[in-house]
Each structure stands twice: as C-alpha cells, then as structure tokens.
C-alpha cells in the first residue's frame, strides 16, 4: 500500500479551508469591535448645559482625536478585509462544481442488477464484449471516444465480471472493496496546485520566511518589550521610577505637580523643537502677578523656585504648561494653548501611578495629595485655589467678590446654600457675571453629583457580632444631593437598613439581584443594575472623564491607611431622572476587608473621595466593635434560649418578676440605648452622641 498527496486541482476544498481560518479570526474581532463598550464614559449621561469655555475648539479637537484612537481603526480594517475574504470564499463554495468519487460497484459497471444470476451475468458480459473488446471496438468521434478510453472501459468491465464470477477475486472485493486487493490512499491538500507548480515554490518559501521569521518574532517581541516597559497603571517604568524618587511623606499638591512633570510620556508630544519653543513666554505669563494669588499660574513661591531650578528642556516646559493649564493662563499662540490642554491627561495618568506608590507606603498624606491633585487636574484649578472655579464663568474677580477677605475658601455647596438674593448680589455686577452667565452657573452647579453620606457601619453577613479576623463589610449609605437642592425629602429609615440575602438566594449572592424592604417593611427582590453617574463637568479637560468615588479607612493617630481604597464607578439606584432632576435615592456602597485579629473597639476615619470634583469629599469617624469569639458565642446562645409560655406556671412566675414572656409585647428600647448588634456611625441633625458623626468636607 502506498500513499499519494494531491492538491486541490478543481478548487473544491481550499475555499472551505480559507473560509474556516478567516472565520476563526474575523468573528472574535467583529464582536470586540461591535460589542457594547464597558467604558462608563461611553454610556454615561451628560450634564445639560450649553457652556463652552475659551478655546473649546482646541479641547474638542483633542477629545475627538482620543476617540478616534479608541475606535481601533486597524481592527476595523482587519474586520472589513476578513468579511471580504469570507464572502469571496463563500461564493466559490456555492458556485464551484463538485467532483464526487463513486464507490467501485461491479454491478453498476456491468449494468446488471444485483439479483442477476451468474448465467445472466455471463450472457450480458458476452454482449458487452461485442461492443468493447479491443479487437472489435471502434471509437466514435462524435462521443469523444478514443482507443485508450475504450481499452480502459474494457479493463473495468473485465474486473467487474471477474469479481462476480471468480471466487478469489470476489474475496478481494469483499475484504478490500476492490478486485485488485488493498489500494493506495490519497491525501488531499486543501490548497490550489498552482501554488507549488510552475516555479511558484520559491515564492511560497519566501512568504513562510516572512511570516515565521520576520513578522511573528517582530510582533511577539514588540508585545513582550512593551509589557516590560509599562506598569499595570499604564505608565512607563522610567516614569514610575522618577515618581518613586520624588515620593516623600510631606509631599503636597504643588510638589506633586512638579513630580508629575518628570514623566517620560511627555517627550513624545514635545519632541524636537517643541521641547523649548515658547518656554520663556509661558514662564512670563504664569509668573505674572495674580489677582488673588501670588502668581497668575497659581504657583506658590516654593513651586516657582522648583521651576527655576530645572534646566531648560522638556521637563521645564511641561511643568510650565501644567501651571498654565491649572491657572487657565492665556498663552496667545494656538500651538502653546493646544500643548497646555494636551499635558493634563498625561499628568492624570501619572498621578494614578503615584497613588499606587503612595498606597504601598500607606501614609495618608501622599495618598490624599494624589486624589486632590487628580481633582484639580480634571477641573483645571490650582492647588489651594477656591473650589468655586469649578463653576462656569467664575473668574478670579468673581471668586474674590464672593469670598471677600475670608481666609478660607467657600465650597460649591456652601455657596449654593446661600439665599439666591445673597448669591446674586455678590456674583452679578459690573466686571462680574451677567444675569445670563449667573443663571448658567447656577444651573450647572445644581447638577453636580455631590454624595452626602447618611450612615456608615460595619457588619458580618449573616452574623450578629463581629469576631476577630472575620470578613467584615463596610456599608456606606448616602444620597446624591446636588448643591443648592431645595425640598430634599427626609431619609426613609428603611433605606438605611442593609438586608442580608438568604443563604439559598443565588441571584442575590452573585449580585444579580438585591434584597430590600418596601414601604410596608416586607422583603422584596430588585434587579441589581449598575447606574453610571453623569460624565464629569470638566470643560477644560481634553478627555471625557467618568467620576469615581474612593472609600478607605485610615488611622488618624498614626496617619496611616488602615483599609485600602475601594473604587466605585457605578451605583445601584438612578442618580438623576431623564430630564436631569435629582432622584435623592439612597445609594449603598460596600467594601469587604478582614477584621482586626484581636477583640476591641477600633476608631477609624472614613474617607469618601471623589477624584473629579474639588470639595466633594467626606471625612467622618466610624467605630468598629470586635467581640471576643467565646463571648460572642455565649451571647448568641443566650439569645437562642426560648422564653416561657404565657399560660405556663413558669411564664406566670416570670411575669410576676417582671421578666419577658413569649407571646407578649416587649417594651421598646430607649432611643439613647446603645445597640450591640452592629458597629455604626449615623449622621443625624440633632445627634447627642459623643462620637463625631458629622460629615465634613476635606480641606
């Protein structure tokens, strides 16, 4: 037995091969291209305003350029080509005529039925011999017959006749399917024969060499070295090393802005002549005298000294551009203004890398500095400057008129809590805001998502007590109340409860549904669909940015982080209605961590920080009570002891002694009585608790 390799000369099979390979690559690419984006910025709503800042065209152009990068043009081209190849191969599959190999059948070859006797077969064979025997057959040109074709026909007839009449030949046919015994097999290759014929073999070898020897090593090497050059935060290793070198426990926002300028990512957009062009002009503008700050760029004296200590080059220009961006300094040249808006998103990504470094050290000062710097980069507000700059049209003159000679800045919430007449008289006037600008400013401020925390407490799911090393859940309850909101409804006490799901409720345990109490106090299930907040109102930031809230615990005595930040990008209830009005729904934030290994009472500071708005943060004390495991077990056992029935003798005696009896109503606890069921901190207007439960904005 031998084997034979044959190529697809009729083009029957290679379209299937190419179609299959192309489908394997094209379908996943198509799905990744058309699948709904998981980026919150792509689906989040936007604040309703027509406000456009100065140089809005430059900012929008950079946002559009970033979106074009995110559309993955190369992937789209690959998908289009893939579908074109698939369509071409499918056309060949449908239109190409098939060549079907028939099974060798002696009855069909002789033209007799399978029920024919041997005598009938011999008689029919003799008749065929008169037509096809080489001595008697004559080719018919009309039928394209030749002597060779007739001889082949006679050979086939003879084999078929012997198969049906000769016992030895019949046995070969029965065993191997052919009178000649075991046959060679053919392996078909689903590639057209022209690929290796007519001297094309050298080109095939060249293609293989390019694919396997050049392209594959290039792409694998590029991927490998690319991953080795970039941290998991998405910045270059060299930039992270520079930030690591600038880390200190006393770093503040101004120092961090200087440290961010060391990022190597800035060298790409500012390469060549762009590294120093216009530097003197930028520095003269940002170091000019400011209206409410020492310098127009919002720098302090120490920041100016650090800028001047740098040598001319990319870093010095980047730092100057960052201060020009933060101070909203006009540079008069389109190229310089464009570069000013370009550096902010790069600095923002570097700020995230510095935050990761700070979290590794655990010092609360640098961690908060990274969040505050992130807020000011998004809002284009200098460090130590008033949060009122986040409101449209608020210039230094307007801010000075509103705040007066106060040494502390007003937050947006504090400004919007003032009576409208007082706000209007301070902000509207000659050289200040017009009536139209004031209305726009107030409209935007009333849409900003300020999360006001109502209650924070600790619990262990399914347990009454928290014991050492148990898995504790920090529950933070709060509502989004935009600054200046009026007629805010009172808090429903049922919304402050956190209901544990049943042990067999798989949907609730997996997060697909949640268990809540309705208005009647009954447990009901609701779909748990994450709701993204509106995109950040950041008119000067050249990216669409979705706000994030970070909740973490710190030890105020040691100045250290106790529980790492948990990041929240979506919430369990709608924040605004479709027409932009606040819903005041109670939101629930959950963060799990391991309880301390020893029993005791632990006081932490809860930080809830928004990375996108200045002054929208919350800081409050929370207390965690960790019970000893044996004590908690004993207390739980006491609770499980059944009380005597009212009609029994023991029940009557218990009632005479003033004890509780099953079936009777227990007296309600005093409001002032401390509960041991859970560790909690709740914000109440008239609270008389010794624990500090008031939420307050971080400075």
Image: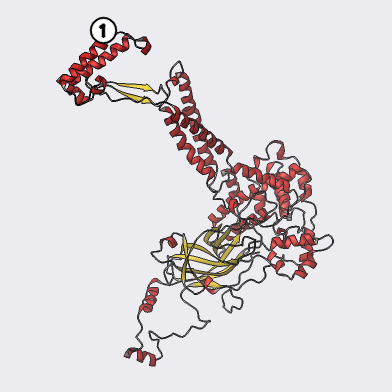
Left or right: 161 with respect to 256? left
Residue 132 seen from this side: no
Look at the picture and state if 656 lies above or below 588. below
Query: What percent of the width, then of the height, locates residue 334?
Result: 76, 43
Q: Quadrant of residue 9?
A: top left
Of the 4 image quadrants, the one containing the C terminus is bottom right
Q: Residue furthest top?
A: 135
Q: Quadrant of residue 237?
A: top right
Query: What percent of the width, then of the height, locates residue 421?
Result: 77, 70
Q: Quadrant of residue 373?
A: bottom right
**Crowd class of label 1 (few under 14; some 14 to 19; many from 20; radius 10 Å):** few
Q: Residue at x 77, y 54 (%)?
A: 295
Task: Report how many numbered discs are placed on residues in the image.
Answer: 1
Query: What percent of the width, then of the height, locates residue 253?
Result: 66, 56
Left or right: 336 with respect to 645? right
Look at the picture and state if 650 lies above or below 557. below
Query: What percent of the width, then of the height, locates residue 66?
Result: 63, 44
Q: Residue at x 60, y 46 (%)?
A: 242
Callout 1: SS = loop
- Which colouring convention does the figure follow? secondary structure
Left or right: 154 with respect to 544? left
Q: Residue furthest bottom?
A: 656
Residue bearing the label numbered 1: 136
Residue 311 seen from this side: yes
Of the 4 image quadrants, the one containing the N terminus is top left
Look at the picture and state if 120 lies above or below 608. above
């Amino acid at each position: 037995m031998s084997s034979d390799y044959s190529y697809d000369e009729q083009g029957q099979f290679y379209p299937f091969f190419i179609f299959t390979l192309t489908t394997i690559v094209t379908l996943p690419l198509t799905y990744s291209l058309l699948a709904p984006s998981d980026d919150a910025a792509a689906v989040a709503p936007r604040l309703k305003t027509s406000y456009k800042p100065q140089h809005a065209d430059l900012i929008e152009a950079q946002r559009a350029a970033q979106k074009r990068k995110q559309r993955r043009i190369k992937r789209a081209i690959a998908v289009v080509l893939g579908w074109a190849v698939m369509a071409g191969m499918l056309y060949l599959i449908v239109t190409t005529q098939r060549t079907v190999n028939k099974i060798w059948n002696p009855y069909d070859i002789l033209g007799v039925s399978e029920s024919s006797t041997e005598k009938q077969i011999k008689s029919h064979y003799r008749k065929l011999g008169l037509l096809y025997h080489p001595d008697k057959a004559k080719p018919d040109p009309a039928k394209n017959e030749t002597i060779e074709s007739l001889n082949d026909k006679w050979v086939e007839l003879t084999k078929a006749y012997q198969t049906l009449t000769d016992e030895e030949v019949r046995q070969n046919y029965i065993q191997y399917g052919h009178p000649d015994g075991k046959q060679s097999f053919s392996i078909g290759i689903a590639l057209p024969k022209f690929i290796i014929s007519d001297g094309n073999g050298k080109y095939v070898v060249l293609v293989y060499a390019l694919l396997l020897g050049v392209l594959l090593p290039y792409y694998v090497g590029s991927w490998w070295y690319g991953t080795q050059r970039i941290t998991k935060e998405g910045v270059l290793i060299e930039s992270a090393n520079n930030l690591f070198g600038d880390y200190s426990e006393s770093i503040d926002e101004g120092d961090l802005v200087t440290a961010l300028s060391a990022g190597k990512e800035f060298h790409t957009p500012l390469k060549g002549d762009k590294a120093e062009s216009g530097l003197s002009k930028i520095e003269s503008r940002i170091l000019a005298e400011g209206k409410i700050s020492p310098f127009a760029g919002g720098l302090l004296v120490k920041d100016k000294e650090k800028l001047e200590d740098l040598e001319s080059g990319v870093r010095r220009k980047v730092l100057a551009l960052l201060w020009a961006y933060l101070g909203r300094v006009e540079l008069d040249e389109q190229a310089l203004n464009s570069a000013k808006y370009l550096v902010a998103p790069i600095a923002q990504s570097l700020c995230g890398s510095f935050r990761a470094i700070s979290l590794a050290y655990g010092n609360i000062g640098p961690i908060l500095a990274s969040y505050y710097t992130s807020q000011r980069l998004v809002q284009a507000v200098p460090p130590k400057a008033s949060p009122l700059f986040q409101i449209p049209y608020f210039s230094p003159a307007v801010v000075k008129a509103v705040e007066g000679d106060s040494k502390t800045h007003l937050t947006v919430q504090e400004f919007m809590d003032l009576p409208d007449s007082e706000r209007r008289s301070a902000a509207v006037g000659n050289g200040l805001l017009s009536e139209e600008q004031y209305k726009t400013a107030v409209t935007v401020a009333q849409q900003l998502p300020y999360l006001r925390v109502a209650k924070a407490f600790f619990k262990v799911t399914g347990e009454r007590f928290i014991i050492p090393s148990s898995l504790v859940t920090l529950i933070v309850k709060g509502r989004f109340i935009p600054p200046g909101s009026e007629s805010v409804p009172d808090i429903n006490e049922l919304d402050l409860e956190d209901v544990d799901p049943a042990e067999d409720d798989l949907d609730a345990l997996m997060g697909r549904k949640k268990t809540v109490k309705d208005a009647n106090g009954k447990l009901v299930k609701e779909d748990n669909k994450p709701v993204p907040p509106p995109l950040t109102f950041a008119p000067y930031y050249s990216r669409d940015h979705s706000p994030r809230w970070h909740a973490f615990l710190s030890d105020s005595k040691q100045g250290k982080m106790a529980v790492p930040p948990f990041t929240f990008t979506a919430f369990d209830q709608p924040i605004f209605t479709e027409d932009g009005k606040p819903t005041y729904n109670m939101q629930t934030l959950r963060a799990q961590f391991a309880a301390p290994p020893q029993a005791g009472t632990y006081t932490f500071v809860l930080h809830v920080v928004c990375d996108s708005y200045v002054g929208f943060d919350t800081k409050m004390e929370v207390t965690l009570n960790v019970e000893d495991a044996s004590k908690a077990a004993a207390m739980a056992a006491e609770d499980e002891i059944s009380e005597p029935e009212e009609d029994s003798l023991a029940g009557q005696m218990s009632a005479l002694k003033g004890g509780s009896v099953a079936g009777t109503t227990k007296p309600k606890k005093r409001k002032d009585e401390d509960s041991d069921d859970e560790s909690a901190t709740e914000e109440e207007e008239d609270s008389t608790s010794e624990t500090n439960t008031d939420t307050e904005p971080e400075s």
